[in-house]
Image: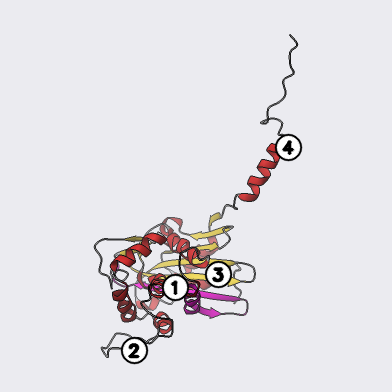
C-alpha cells in the first residue's frame, strides 16, 4: 500500500481559511481597554491631601485611567449623583411633563436659599433641590424604582427602603466603576427610554462649555456617611474623544467640597483631555 504524505496541520501551517477566520475575529473583537494606575493623578490627590478615587474611561473603550483601583470598586452612598438616573426615571414615568414644568414651593424653609422658591426640573437639578426630587419620588413609587434600578443594574439597594429618601440615607450605594458603566449606558442610550427623555437629561446635565469641550456632570455629598463622601460624575466631549469620569473623595468639612470639581478638572487637564 502506498503511504500517503503527512501534511502539517492548521496549527503549524495556517490555510487561507484559517487566516481569514483570525482576521475576521480581529475585526469583530473590540479593543480591550488599557487600565492603568496613574502617577500624575495620584500626585494631584496627594497635593490636595484627600483620600479618594477617580476613574477616567474613554467612551470607545480604548483606555481606562485609574487612581486607587481598590476604592473604585467600593460601593458608597450615591447621594445626589442619583439625580442623573432619577431625572431619567421621572421623565420616563411621566412624574413630570418636561424640564420646564414648574414645581411650586410649599413655603417651608430649607437650609439652602436656592431651594426656597418654585423650581423646574432643570433648576432643581442645578441646585440639587432635595424636596423637588422627593416630590417626584412619591409620584414614581417604590415598585417602579425597583424595576428601573434592576434594569440598569445600578448599584445596590437595601430593602426595605424609604421611597423618597433611599438615595439620601445610604440605602442606595454604588461604586465609581459602576457610575462609569451606568453613564456609558446613558450616553449610548442603551436603556429603553424615549429619545426625548435622553435629550432632556443632556440639556439638564450640561455644566460647562469650553472652547473645545462640553462637560456634563452632577455633584453629590453624602453628609450622613462616616466619613462623609463627595462625588463628581459625568462625561466630557471633545473633538478627539468622549471621556466618562467618576470621582469620590472623603470629605472632612464643607470647605473641601470644591475639591470634587477641581480635582476632576485638574486630572482632565493633566491627561490632556481638556486644556483650559
Q: Position of residue 44 (x, y in %)?
A: 50, 67
Real-space Cα separation, disc 2 to disc 4, in angstroms: 72 Å
Question: Can residue 133 be seen by looking at this rendering?
Answer: yes
Task: Say which of marks 2 and 1 sits in front.
Answer: 2
- Dot placed on the residue nearer the N-terminal end, 2 or 4: 4
Image depth: mark 1 or mark 4 in front: 4
The residue indicated by pointer 2 is 113
Q: Earlier in the sequence, mark 3 or mark 2?
A: 2
Kindly state the secondary structure of the residue where label 4 is placed. Answer: helix
Element type where label 2 sits in the image: helix
Question: Quick one: label 4, few (<14), some, or many (20+) residues within 10 Å?
Answer: few
Identify residue for label 4: 16
Q: CA distance from mark 3 to mark 1?
A: 13 Å
Q: Which residue is mark 1?
A: 260
Rounded to the nearest angstrom, the CA distance separating label 2 from label 1 is 22 Å
167 falls in the magenta region: no
Q: Is residue 200 magenta?
A: yes
The structure residue drawn at horizontal position 63% and vertical position 45%, both measured from the top left corner, is: 25
In the structure shown, which secondary structural element does the residue marked by tag 3 occupy? Answer: helix
Q: Which residues are magenta?
A: 198-226
* Residue that numbered label 3 is attached to: 268
**What's the coloring here?**
secondary structure
Residue, far top: 1
Q: Are marks 2 and 1 in contact (CB under 8 Å)?
A: no
Q: Quadrant of residue 70?
A: bottom left
Residue placed most toward the observer, 19 or 272: 19
Amino acid at each position: 500500500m502506498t503511504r500517503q504524505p503527512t501534511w502539517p496541520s492548521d496549527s503549524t501551517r495556517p490555510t487561507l481559511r484559517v487566516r481569514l477566520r483570525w482576521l475576521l475575529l480581529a475585526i469583530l473583537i473590540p479593543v480591550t481597554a488599557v487600565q492603568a494606575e496613574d502617577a500624575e493623578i495620584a500626585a494631584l490627590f496627594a497635593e490636595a491631601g484627600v483620600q479618594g478615587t477617580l476613574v477616567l474611561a474613554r467612551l470607545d473603550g480604548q483606555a481606562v485611567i485609574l487612581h486607587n483601583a481598590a476604592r473604585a470598586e467600593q460601593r458608597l452612598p450615591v447621594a445626589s449623583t442619583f439625580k442623573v438616573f432619577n431625572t431619567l426615571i421621572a421623565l420616563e414615568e411621566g412624574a413630570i411633563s418636561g424640564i420646564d414644568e414648574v414645581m411650586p414651593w410649599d413655603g417651608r424653609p430649607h437650609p439652602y436659599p436656592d431651594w426656597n422658591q418654585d423650581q423646574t426640573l432643570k433648576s432643581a437639578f442645578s441646585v440639587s433641590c432635595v424636596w423637588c426630587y422627593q416630590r417626584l419620588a412619591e409620584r414614581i413609587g417604590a415598585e417602579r424604582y425597583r424595576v428601573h434600578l434592576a434594569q440598569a443594574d445600578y448599584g445596590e439597594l437595601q430593602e426595605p427602603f424609604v421611597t423618597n429618601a433611599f438615595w439620601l440615607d445610604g440605602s442606595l450605594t454604588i461604586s465609581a466603576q459602576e457610575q462609569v458603566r451606568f453613564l456609558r449606558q446613558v450616553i449610548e442610550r442603551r436603556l429603553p427610554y424615549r429619545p426625548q427623555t435622553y435629550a432632556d437629561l443632556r440639556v439638564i446635565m450640561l455644566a460647562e462649555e469650553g472652547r473645545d469641550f462640553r462637560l456634563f456632570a452632577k455633584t453629590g455629598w453624602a453628609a450622613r456617611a462616616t466619613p462623609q463622601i463627595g462625588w463628581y460624575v459625568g462625561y466630557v466631549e471633545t473633538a478627539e474623544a468622549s471621556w466618562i469620569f467618576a470621582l469620590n473623595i472623603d470629605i472632612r468639612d464643607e470647605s473641601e467640597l470644591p475639591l470634587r470639581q477641581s480635582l476632576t478638572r485638574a486630572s482632565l487637564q493633566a491627561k490632556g483631555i481638556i486644556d483650559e
